[in-house]
Image: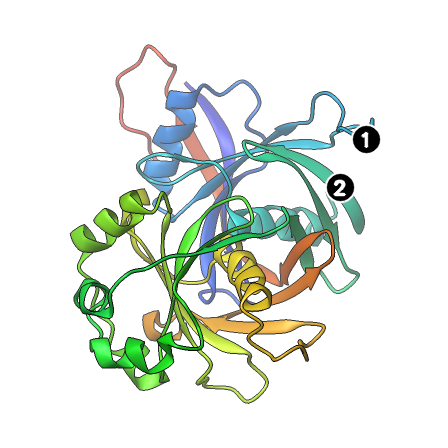
Amino acid sequence: METRRALLVDAFAAEPLAGNAAGVLPDAEGLSDDQMAAVAAELGASETAFLTDGDGTTDAGEGVDDRLRYFSPTTEVDLCGHATVATYGALFAEGAIDGGERTLRTNVGDLTVSVDDDGTVWMRQQAPSVETVEVDAGRLGPALGIDPAALRDVGADLPVAVASTGLPFLVVPVNFLERLGEADPDDEAIERLSEEFDAAGVYAFTFDTLEGDSTLHGRAFVPSLGISEDPVTGTASGAVGGYLRHVDAFDGDEPDELRFEQGHFLGRPGHVRVRVEADGVRVGGRTSVALDGEVQIPDDDEDEIIEA
């Protein structure tokens, strides 16, 4: 049995116990899939990132600095924005990496991460893909636990769509924050919708916000990954940034940077900065390490419970 360092890092929050907690193993070299899955289940965060050395080169012939894999408590996830931000925010805070850009390899391809001098981590995601879909409000409302009228009010101008910058989400606009706050989703119905539209989950949002400088307030429901509600979601935020441009939500006068607030209804307030650019989307935020410890990992042939 061996011991590895394990962190819990709160992403998209400048203080601990806010934002979205991610597990981070800064050294996951040599761990098997089963070991990583077991560690993620033990840590219990919505996702845990496992960092190893990079291998190979990008399409542009540049070296890959790091390899990241992500596991929820129940399955491997191809991409996770908040766990990526958490990983590099923690590494920068302890001086393990310098500011500037790094290239990481994920299951969806090679991505660029950069860290500002103040510790803000920016993750470049893939160019967004957005496809509007037809889903009756009479079906969406009960699935989300929201009055269908709150969805019909905005449906003419803001359609439901599947949007992705590497991990697809079903994007659902809601008229008012009060209605979004009342959401009480039916996990099984959300899972059926996710499966039908080949999405990781449902991201519901409203332009009615708590803070005046926020662009929107969002809530993300991802029971297919074992997460009834994810507090603050980087990959979904990137996808929604692409969605807003696709549907021309700002009538051609789109701000250079969007600010999404999320997690407040779970007592985990956080903020995601989103920049939709010509060649992709960048999401950014601050991080705070909430727990720094060790995890014992049984050998592959040992059937033991991991002790955190």
Q: Image quarter for residue 110? A: top right
| Amino acid on which disc 2 is placed | Arg
Q: Residues within 10 Å of mark 2 (few under 14, many from 20)?
A: some
What numbered label is drawn on residue 102?
A: 2
Q: Secondary structure at mark 1?
A: loop
- Please tell me which residue lies in front, 297 or 81: 81
Q: Residue furthest bottom?
A: 212
Residue occupied by mark 1: 60
Could you give the CA–CA distance between mark 2 and mark 1, rounded to whole angstroms? 14 Å
Question: Looking at the image, how many numbered discs can be counted on the residues?
Answer: 2
Q: Is residue 102 shown left or right of residue 1?
A: right
The residue sitting at 18% across, 69% down in the picture is 138
The residue sitting at 37% across, 22% down in the picture is 34
- Please tell me which residue lies in front, 76 or 247: 247
Q: Quadrant of the N terminus?
A: top left
**Residue 87 seen in the current view:** yes
Q: Are marks 2 and 1 in contact (CB under 8 Å)?
A: no
From this view, report whether residue 109 is shown above or below residue 81: above
The residue sitting at 79% across, 46% down in the picture is 101
Residue 47 place in picture, x, y as percent: 42, 45
Residue 3 place in picture, x, y as percent: 47, 27
Residue 203 place in picture, x, y as percent: 39, 62
**Residue 272 seen in the current view:** no
The residue sitting at 30% across, 36% down in the picture is 74
